[in-house]
Image: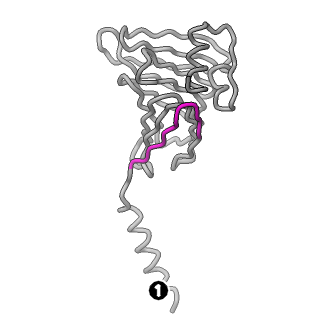
């Protein structure tokens, strides 16, 4: 007798779940602050100072797409069926294949950098001629893209100074004074 009402209730809840509206969520950090957020697929994102991340309330379809302005470290949950895509400023995208990586893409900066800690990512951008290009990164490499000129530069790195911010640290190793001042300005809102 109880089985029939339970089945009816369960089927109504199940069918209504698919019709649930998808909302765009946005997380922002204030100057000098950092935060972390867990996305609907259990991907963990750490946001640095003056950054924002837009993502859907649930991921549907063939890809999991988010939009980033600022700097973030992504610890992406693997999903063989759905790729993870981070859209950044200046019409560039990073396609992720289950990995940990850092992206610095402030709209006011004249460059976008991606540092791969583990796994694999593809960086999609436009070159000088406006043609779409893709570069695959290897772990412990940093790619710096300059949108104005369409140039890219690849560096080997220990990843220590690029991702130390998420643990509340600042690490300087062979860092230029300009980059030091930029990092301190972000960290302390000066």
Count all numbered tags in the image, as a single digit.
Answer: 1
Image coords of residue 160 (percent x, y): 69, 21
Q: Residues within 10 Å of mark 1 (few under 14, many from 20)?
A: few
Residue in view at x 42 percent, y 64 percent: 17
Residue at label 1? 4
Q: Is 95 left or right of 130, judged from the image as shown? A: right
Image coords of residue 161 (percent x, y): 66, 19
Residue in view at x 50 percent, y 31 percent: 50
Image coords of residue 92 (percent x, y): 39, 24
Query: Colour mode?
Result: one colour
Q: Residue furthest front?
A: 190
Q: Quadrant of residue 110?
A: top left
Looking at the rendering, in which quadrant would you find the C terminus?
top right
Q: Is residue 26 covered in magenta?
A: yes
Image coords of residue 141 (percent x, y): 60, 16
Q: Quadrant of residue 125?
A: top left
Residue in view at x 38 percent, y 52 percent: 23
Q: Residue furthest bottom?
A: 1
Tell me: residue 144, above or below residue 43: above
Q: Which residues are magenta?
A: 24-35
Q: Is residue 27 covered in magenta?
A: yes
Tell me: residue 55, above or below residue 185: below
Q: Is 120 left or right of 105, judged from the image as shown? A: right
Q: Quadrant of residue 168?
A: top right
Q: Is 61 left or right of 50, judged from the image as shown? A: left
Along the viewing direction, whichever of 43 and 119 lies nearer the viewer: 43
Q: Please, what secondary structure does the residue beneath circle 1 have? A: helix
């Amino acid at each position: 007798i109880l089985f029939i009402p339970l089945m009816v209730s369960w089927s109504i809840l199940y069918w209504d779940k698919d019709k649930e509206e998808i909302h765009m969520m946005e997380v922002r950090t204030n100057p000098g602050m950092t935060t972390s957020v867990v996305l609907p697929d259990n991907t963990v994102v750490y946001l640095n100072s003056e950054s924002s991340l837009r993502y859907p309330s649930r991921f549907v379809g063939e890809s999991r797409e988010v939009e980033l302005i600022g700097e973030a470290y992504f610890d992406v949950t693997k999903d063989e069926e759905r790729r993870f895509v981070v859209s950044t400023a200046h019409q560039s995208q990073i396609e992720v294949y289950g990995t940990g990586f850092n992206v610095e893409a402030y709209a006011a900066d004249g460059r976008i950098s991606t540092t791969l800690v583990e796994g694999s990512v593809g960086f999609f951008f436009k070159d000088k001629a406006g043609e779409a290009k893709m570069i695959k990164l290897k772990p412990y490499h940093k790619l710096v893209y300059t949108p104005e000129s369409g140039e890219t530069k690849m560096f080997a790195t220990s990843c220590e100074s690029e991702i130390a911010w998420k643990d509340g640290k600042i690490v300087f190793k062979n860092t230029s004074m300009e980059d030091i001042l930029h990092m301190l300005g972000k960290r302390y809102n000066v």
